Amino acid sequence: MPTPTKNSQTMAPKKKASRQKKPAVVTPSQPPMETAPAQLKVEIRGDGVVVVESSVKKIEQMAALDIAQLNSLNLPLPPPVIKPGERGLGLGSELTRPLHGNALLEELSKMRQEKFLTDLELACKTKAFDVHKLVISSVSQYFREILAKDPSMKRLELPSLSPLGLANVITFAYLGRVHMSLYTIGCTASAAATLQIPQLLKMCMDFLLAELNVQTCVYIWNIAAAYCLVPVCDAARRFVLENFVQFADTPLFTQLTLEQISAFLQDDSLLLPSEVTSLQLAMRWLDFDASRQDHAAELLSHIRFETILASELVSQIQPVPRMMMDPHCHRLLVDAMNYHLLPYQQNTLQSRRTQLRAGQQTLLTIGGRPSLTERALSREVLWRDPREGGATWRHLSQLPAKSFNQCVAVMDGFLYVAGGEDQNDARNQAKHAVNTLSRYDPRFNTWLHLTSMRQRRTHFSLAASGGRLFAIGGRNVEGLLATTESYLPSSNTWQMRAPMEVPRCCHSSATLPSGDILVTGGYINCAYSRSVACYNVDTDTWSEKAPLETPRGWHCSATLGGKVYVVGGSQLGPGGERVDVLSVEVFSPESGTWSRAAPLLLGVSTAGLSTLADKLYLLGGWNETEKRYKAAVQKYDPSTDNWSMAEDLPEPTVGVSCCTLTLPPRHAPRRQQHRNTPSHEEQQQAGKNRSRESSMAPSQAITA
């Protein structure tokens, strides 16, 4: 090094001048450090990356560091104190380059276009593409399996794929994006399915679903069917069924084949303003081409004439010339009229043509005694509307007469309401027991008064099995009942059946999968009972089953998942007072044993219980602890063995019945009608007045 001058020695600090510096350590691989600083060139690119270059010497040519001096700087660190969510001192941090994956894919795509390091050629019908095995096999199970067998493969023939489809697959593999249109989606979906690329196949399905409308639905349905895109097929089918009237206004409707339009008209999910509309659309398709007239009877057999009001059959269907001139079509009209003329035979006349289209399984409440109406009983039939976020209870119909502690059952799509009390008299409820039976038809929002039971009954049970109704036990002014009677709809008659061994009331019954009826608990010999009896419908015999763990009365039971759930009720406590029973017991018909489910959140008696969508719903009732009517709706999920609270009833109610019934879609009930209204003064007089004005004399239809 050059010898320092005098001036430079004078200007140096004294402390530094007196300190003896250690000579730099020079190794054979490290030349001495230059006095002139290295010139560095900094370049900032658009993506924010800084590139540093040395314009004089490389970093490797810099002198070695003074190890002793470096070590002197490594002071001991205090032990780290790390709080939750904080970075620890000395633990470091992981840094991520934003959009690194996108940049990497872009570079790989450029490398493919430049054929740099490509190692596989994919050849289709008229074109070949160079790709990287690593990239293409990362998205395709097909390529992965092929290359696993032959890693050295250089060329792969794919003759079944179109050039555009294969090009889209390659673009997706490198960039994760692809251009789609209804004109090119077919070849892309085919390539994605053949090469087993589920992510791309899902993108194709999402695109098709987004393009669904009345103009494209059939085309999309055909594409989905061709490439086995089942979710898209189902969605396109649902779209057509739910928008059939709008679809019928497009030219595509008249281009449907006989098989296609027949399939639509047969479908239970077809959504129409009324069944008359289905006839009008069928006639439009038939009239479009004269050669289709030969298929009129076959096509019109899919129209559900039985679900059309009798008055509309006369006013709108009968005037259609084909319905009167074609003997096969005329037979359809006659069958529908007979269905209306024979109301008591309708249970045995049930078929696809009598079923509601797009019907919705709906929870109903029937009758009861609301707390806000003091002594008045209710005639309300409410339905649970789940459409508006939280469910809402809406008016459906009114009972022919006020009712309390009645029993209900659903059979052949009809709601049956039997017995109960027609007056509110807490001191002598049995005195006001009735024997009435009414049937509600949700297709037409009508009530039909049927033959009354042979005995007045309240606090009894009603079950449907084998096409019959069975009224079991209960009580009336004469006392507790052991009798059983069954109702046969086709003859509109009741028959006495084998009685129970002992009289009982305040019990519950449920129909087992075998058709037998399980009767649980109740009030027997002046005490709440654990007794369980089973009625065999075929042999008309009773047998005892394993008893309940807890005696109870005023409870409910329902069959769900092949098992019977016994819910709620009350029993006598140690001091002789009535107490709520919170435990829930489950009967297994296979083993004949009882087990426990999660207990109720709120104890209730005289509540309503029904099943809906694999759940149990317990509605209203009387709570012994609070001595109050309750509006609570408790929901049980057997898959989680858990109870939760659902939307309350409009008001607290006891003695309410509950069931699940299929209602018309987006329910907007027709004006209510009663047939053969039960004999109570106001209803009977109204019925007489209106029957004179009715043109439907055979069915005795009377507008309420």
Image: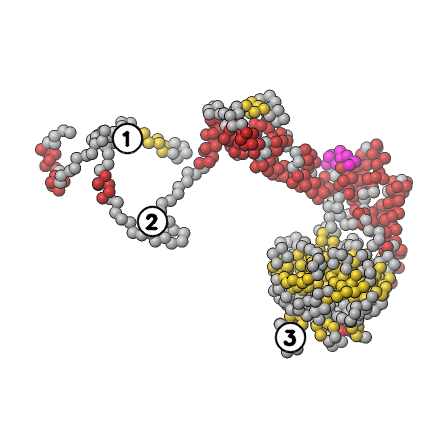
Q: How crowded is mark 3: few (under 14 residues within 10 Å), some or many (20 or more)?
A: few
Instruction: Please tell me which residue lies in front, 591 or 247.
Output: 591
Q: Do the residues labelled 2 and 3 touch (CB within 8 Å)?
A: no
Q: What element carries label 1?
A: helix
Residue 497, percent from left and from top: 84, 65
- Mark 2: which amino acid? Leu
- Picture quarter with the C terminus: bottom right
Q: How far apart are marks 2 and 1 (CA)?
A: 31 Å
- Picture quarter with the N terminus: top left
Q: Residues within 10 Å of mark 2 (few under 14, many from 20)?
A: few
* Residue on which the image places disc 3: 573
Q: Is mark 3 on a helix, strand or loop?
A: loop
* Residue on which the image places disc 2: 89
- Mark 3: which amino acid? Gly
Numbered badge on residue 299: none
* Residue on which the image places disc 1: 60
Q: Which of marks 2 and 3 is nearer the N terminus?
A: 2
142 vs 657: above or below: above
Residue at the image position 49 percent from the left and 25 percent from the top = 118
- Mark 1: which amino acid? Glu
Instruction: Please tell me which residue lies in front, 192 or 211.
Output: 192
Q: Where is residue 394, by image quadrant?
A: bottom right
Residue 480 visible (yes or no): yes
* Residue depth check, mark 3 versus mark 1: number of the one nearer the observer: 3
Q: What element carries label 2?
A: loop
Residue 278, percent from left and from top: 78, 43
Magenta stretch prevailing secondary structure = helix
Segment colored magenta: 250-259
